[in-house]
Image: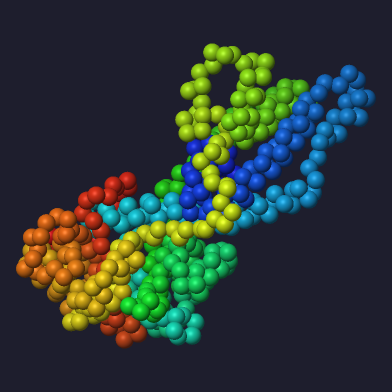
Amino acid sequence: KRLFSAEHLNFILGDHLLFYQFSTFLNRFRPSLVPTLIRYLEMRKAMKAIEYANAVARSIRWPSHTDYCKFSRVQAAATDARFEDYAARELLLLCSEALPAFVTHTLIGVVSDCVARDITGQGIPIMRDLVGNLAEVYCLTDPSVHDNPIIFASEEFHRTTQYGTNYAINSNCRFLQGPATDKDTTLRLAKAISLGQESNEILLNYRRDGTPFVNLLMCSPLYDDKGVIRYFIGAQIDVTGLVIDGLGIESFRALLHNDETKRLEATAEQNNLQSKFSVHHPSNKTKESLSKLQELSMMFSHEESDVANRNSRGWDDSTDADSVRSEVVDNGLNFSHLNISNSNPMNRNLPGVYKHYLLVRPYPSLQIIFVSPSLRIPGLLRTHLFTKLGGPTQTISALEAAFRDGASVTAKVLWLPKNTRAGERGRGPAEVKPRFIRCTPLLGSDDRVGVWMVILVPVDGEPFNSSYGRRDPIYD
């Protein structure tokens, strides 16, 4: 709950660099929420200004005890309840729509890199403890059947969820939901499925024994060659290890670190507290007003910061402008990179963890029946998988044996272009691409392979930013 909380969002908005990252994300993927963000920031700034005004009023030294008793508890300003309600609604919208999308996108970036490292064998085994079962947990659902039930699932799906074939097959995936599963997330997922759209969400799911886990879910429609949705492929990754300590989520990790800093500061202040200091001591009230001013100033725009600096009594023209904390925003929040002029902004789907994938019929057919949007090229569907794969004879033989035996396998191959056959593998690097592939069988109610999920990862050309390990044998 804290991951998608108002506390987390306000922490992001209070840090100039995190704000820039968050607002840039909205500008690209959720432009319809940009006006909401700016409106909430301005309303929050107005309320912070009122808090500062009241803190200043409380710090006033009154000439007599009578005046102190009369005026010390009188507010200099107050926020209209209607204004507060409107700001609360804007905050709720940002926490339920903008923040989950931002966190999901952040984790997708981390996990995508982890998948590439895991498949290509460039990972660190310890990362398996933080991100489990990469490119192995899948289920296939049939929307033409009532309630869109699971018809095929990988063995790792059953191991991860602890639900066996008899329970999971022919059931809707909602059996993984529990008391703390976010309803807004499940509603977004259901809406995307009804519209035939790909959806990427972070869900709190539950294993059969009741243990919760954080599930990074990709749910993507599979179209036939006539453009009709036949199935949905669901890919799950357990990212509990990344979320608990904020690993991979810079803003959440900083929030957790801030908790520890506050705890240490509170302990130190308690140790230094002297009984002679009254709660009404002027220095404490001045400190309070300065704290409120700092909170307010963090929300100033460039122009407001410039005015405040140049007109303050302590301003010095020799002040080094480069000494500010963030080079991105210099001084104050920057809205110049946001597009608020679009009268009908369209939201974009988040890119999923798995960008290039195929679904293939069981051995011996091995016919490619569905592909990811990135691989929708003429002539690929309905072809035999091995007509698109090249490489050493030993590698191809090992792959064929794995498909025959229904065993997961990872291999380095040559991805052959359209209409290329095994005898034409030397047509040049522009047409023949080295790829790593990870092939995972999905089983039906009879425990027989119903379909294969094949993930493709480029050997080079995409930067790695994280780390991982692998489990399946790699044939090269």
Does any portion of residue 245 appear in the rendered image?
Answer: no
In the image, what residue occupies the spot 81% across and 23% down?
A: 60
- Asked if residue 315 shows in the view, the reply is yes
Foreground pick, 305 / 263: 305
In the rendering, at what x and y percent does residue 473 appear? 18, 63
Tell me if 122 is positioned left or right of 347 in this view.
left
At which x and y percent is residue 361? 25, 79
Q: How is the image coloured?
A: rainbow
406 lies left or right of 272: left
Q: Quadrant of the C terminus?
A: bottom left
Q: How many marks?
A: 0
Vertical placement of residue 314 versus 185, above or below: above
Q: Nearer the viewer, residue 355 or 223?
A: 223
Q: Position of residue 397 (x, y in %)?
A: 10, 71
- Left or right of 2 in this view: 65: right
Residue at left offset 64%, top offset 43%: 41
Percent coordinates x, y for residue 324 in the rendering: 51, 26
Q: Is residue 261 left or right of residue 159?
A: right
Query: Against 108, is 226 above or below?
Result: below
* Residue at (56% x, 51% y) in the render: 342
